[in-house]
Image (cartoon, grey):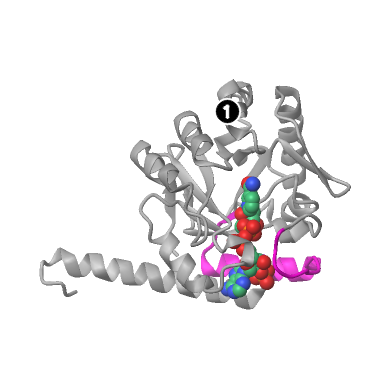
Amino acid sequence: MELRMLGPKRAMVSPIALGSTKFGRREGVKYPNDFVLPSDAELRDLLAQAKDWGINLVDTAPAYGSSEARIGGLVGADDHWRIATKVGEEFVDGQSYFDFSPAAIRASVERSRRRLRRDVLDIVLLHLSDDDTAILRDGAAVACLFELREKGLITAVGASTKNAAAGLLAVEDCDIVMITLNPADQSQRPVLTAARDADKGVLIKKPLDSGHHGDAGAALADLVCEPGVGSVVVGTINPDHLASNCAAVERALANMQAAVDGGDNGMGMA
Ligand SMILES: NC(=O)c1ccc[n+]([C@@H]2O[C@H](COP(=O)([O-])OP(=O)(O)OC[C@H]3O[C@@H](n4cnc5c(N)ncnc54)[C@H](OP(=O)(O)O)[C@@H]3O)[C@@H](O)[C@H]2O)c1
């Protein structure tokens, strides 16, 4: 899988990434079916399989239970992997708590560096709550992440937003924005357009509507071919799903390349 540039910090990432909510948390999630957390051996195999397909980005968060620590233990020392994590949301005793104060953000980044076993975090996103627009307008949380970037503790700063207004603010203020885009929810599409025009990085979350969308291959194929999309973050703990998702993406990208090559000779043929 050919890597793509993600935003102004020029990180090279695979067109699909591994979403890791199901690596570490079962409570308070919106997936259609209950599941058990993968064992360490299953997770090791899944990450190795993803690496074999050329995936080099995994998305995690402190709010995903044991996900961060498990990823750090399994691939933190492997510089093949780019790791995106978040700040601002904690999930404790089945309940989400939000704190975007600079003190909380600094403490969260320190903890993520320890858990992920990385001196420098590749990508840190604000894990925004329903008042995402107000938090971005306030500016203190974004400023704190940039301060940590200046200190060399973070490479790229971003925000995972809930609505288009916040997404547009994040495009103005950050290196990277993470938005929901899937066949059932196109509400943040204007953010993709704005990010593309501003050369900012775009990560797509919930590309399969958290498992509620039936045709996974077609949805992922469409998304990876969208201009401006950096990486599509798909959550899975199922090796067969991972393989079929990667195969669908590779086919779509090969077809897109063939169409471009065909167009180049002006005859519609390669
Ligand atoms: N606020 C935020 O920042 C935020 C919010 C949500 C998500 N995220 C990130 O984005 C990632 C993706 O979002 P998501 O996990 O909510 O949803 P998603 O990627 O849209 O869907 C994941 C669900 O789809 C299933 N699935 C995957 N491939 C499949 C296939 N080929 N056929 C059938 N089912 C398939 C998975 O089940 P199996 O495990 O059985 O494959 C899982 O239940 C998360 O893991 C997380 O890293 C961030």
Q: Quadrant of residue 210?
A: bottom right
Residue 17, given in percent of the width and then of the height, sits at 56, 58
Secondary element type, mark 1: helix
Residue 33 sits inside the magenta stretch: yes
**Left/right of residue 100 with respect to residue 56 in the rendered view:** right
Q: Quadrant of residue 75?
A: bottom right
Give 266 or 169, whichever is nearer the viewer.
169
Q: Amino acid at mark 1?
A: Leu
Query: Height in image: 92 above or below 34?
Result: above
Look at 54% across and 42% down and name the residue there: 163
Ligand 1 sits in which quadrant?
bottom right
Look at 49% across and 62% down and name the residue there: 183
Look at 58% across and 65% down and name the residue there: 51
Query: Height in image: 270 above or below 67?
Result: below
Residue 230 sits inside the magenta stretch: no
According to the picture, the residue beneath numbered tag 1 turns out to be 136
**Left/right of residue 108 with respect to residue 225 in the rendered view:** right
Look at 70% across and 23% down and name the residue there: 102
Residue 62, given in percent of the width and then of the height, sits at 75, 44
In the image, which residues are magenta? 30-58
Give 37 or 129, whichever is nearer the viewer.
129
Q: Residue furthest right?
A: 93
**Left/right of residue 200 with respect to residue 205 in the rendered view:** left
Crowdedness of circle 1 by 10 Å Cα count: few (<14), some, many (20+)?
A: many
